[in-house]
Image: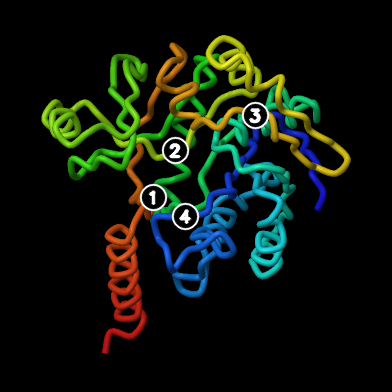
Amino acid sequence: MGCEETKKSQKLQPVILCGGFGKRLWPLSSQRRPKQFLPLFNGLSTFQMTIQRVQNAKKFKPPLCITHISLYKSLYAHIKHSDLTVSPCVLKEIKSKNTTSAILSAALYTQNKDMKKTPLLVMPSDHIIYGINEFERSLNHAHQILAENPKAIISLGITPSSAHTGYGYIEQGEAYIATSFKEKPDKKTAQNYLKKNNYLWNTGIFLCYADTLLKEAEKLCPDVVPSLKIDIQSNLIDNSKTRNIAFDIAIMEKTDKKHVVKANFSWSDIGGWPQLITQLSKNIVLKHVNSKRQNPC
């Protein structure tokens, strides 16, 4: 699968993280069949829904997907059976080393492909979003903020509906600056965040330039980038000597470049059985409402 570039440098470069194994949905999800590849929503997987979300060629470059080498065949099968106008490029990791490894590998890869002026749109593949128009409006807003603050790392945040301890929380400051970023707080801390009314859930979606990511990594986790070896010909990432650490902990909690834009789309990370049951129920209701609209009798 090729990784051709488009001419307009300000299209966004989607970077889709597809290497997780979804252990919290066991036994439905397993290492051989992780949750992003389960066809749970009208026969589609969340990976397919994610990649279809960035098929607008006027706004997005061909997606760059990053997965573990053992999942490559599953990923390719889902791509093959998706209604796509643009084929993605796939990078394969030798080891599963969390999101810092994957995201910084994408940053290195795009720089090697001479895409330094292209904003990276980093997205998980195992989340669900309703409202494509709201999603694109939120991205447009974040893109405007990035144009004004090109060294920013801009997260999309969602207004929390409960004191959930499985999500990261972003504290909103002035002028879209995020004053703090806390990954998965305890229950009491999450309840305090909810009362303050200026915290957002972290969706794991963010926008920035590759150069910013690499410079922040050099300051905050200087061992990671030198440990990544990328074969541009085979699209293989040798991260066998890379530290296993989440991007939120390695970069987002520490960086002074973090900004946040409040998004208005409906979102869930389907992080466990309660979230999955809620989303499946919502999907059934939406199907019923749509069928009534089409057949009011």
Taking the spot 71% from the left edge, 19% from the top edge, the residue there is 226
Disc 3/disc 2 C-alpha distance (Å): 21 Å
Q: Which mark is residue 165?
A: none
Q: Nearer the viewer, mark 1 or mark 3?
A: 3
Q: Amino acid at mark 1?
A: Asp
Q: Which residue is mark 2?
A: 204
Whether residue 59 appears in this view of the structure is no
Residue sitting farthest toward the front: 241
Give the amino acid type for the residue marked by disc 2 in the picture: Gly
State the residue position of label 4.
Answer: 22
Task: From the viewer's perspective, tell me whether residue 233 is left or right of residue 131.
Answer: right
- Callout 3: SS: loop
Disc 1 target residue: 269
Which quarter shows the C terminus? bottom left
Which of pointers 2 and 4 lies earlier in the amino acid sequence? 4
To which quarter of the image does residue 183 belong? top left
The amino acid beneath tag 3 is Thr
* Alpha-carbon span between mark 1 and mark 4: 11 Å
Looking at this rendering, what residue extends furthest in the left direction? 195
Residue situated in front as seen by the camera: 210 or 235: 235
Percent position of residue 151, x then y: 55, 14
Q: Which residue is mark 3?
A: 242
